[in-house]
Image (cartoon, rainbow, N blue to C red):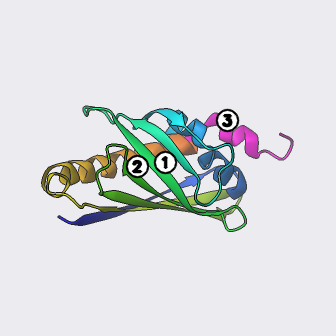
Amino acid sequence: MDEFHGQASVRVDATPQAVFDFITDVGRLPEWNNAIEAVLAQPAALAEGAEWTVRMHPPSTPRWGSISRVVELSRDQCRFAYQTRNADGNPSYSEWAWAIARSGAGADVTVTWRVHLKTFDRRFLGGPIRKRQLAREVPRSLAELASAHRLRRLSKPDA
């Protein structure tokens, strides 16, 4: 396997801008993404080219460092894309893209991922395992995002 991809969506009871602001606040990633144990480094301001580092720890797997770099950041269009790579220097990488659209009084959130496996160990061992993990992890993270009480409170007009 040289690459794999996936997509997941959720409806969130919040404005698209509130959702966008929440998911692009990288310091808060562990609040709703259970695979992220901690944010180790983050930029002073998120902008195209900015990087942040997290410690990943999906259930039943070892921990690893992951570095992400912003590729697209558009609050007006509610689009956010970034590329991630392991901190160990492996050339394999993932591309993530978020799109948030108004849906009634809320927002539809869609995330897509494309994982590019560049080494033997990632193609034949790590990749197949990670593919199964992401198929479970991403929908769980989106469900956490949708139920984030702070996000709902931030999106109310009087907040």
Q: Farthest right residue?
A: 158
The x and y percentages for residue 140 are 42, 43
Name the quarter where the C terminus is drawn.
top right
Highlighted magenta segment, given as a residue range? 147-159
Which residue is drawn at the image coordinates 53% and 39% (left, top)? 29
Residue under pointer 1: 142
Instruction: Find out whether the residues at labels 1 and 2 contact each other: C-beta distance under 8 Å.
Output: yes
Q: State the SS at label 3.
A: helix
Q: CA distance from mark 3 to mark 2?
A: 20 Å
Q: Is residue 141 magenta?
A: no
Which residue is drawn at the image coordinates 78% and 44% (left, top)? 156
Rendered image: mark on residue 13: none
The x and y percentages for residue 72 are 58, 65
Q: Nearer the viewer, residue 35 or 48?
A: 48
Q: Amino acid at mark 3?
A: Arg
Q: Could you tell whether 77 is left or right of 135 in the image? A: right
Q: Earlier in the sequence, mark 3 or mark 2?
A: 2
Q: State the SS at label 2.
A: helix
Q: State the SS at label 1.
A: helix
Which residue is drawn at the image coordinates 59% and 37% (left, top)? 27
Secondary structure that dominates the magenta span: helix
Rendered image: mark on residue 150: 3
Label 3: how many Cα within 10 Å (few below 14, some 14–19, many 20+): few
Residue under pointer 2: 138
Q: Amino acid at mark 1?
A: Leu
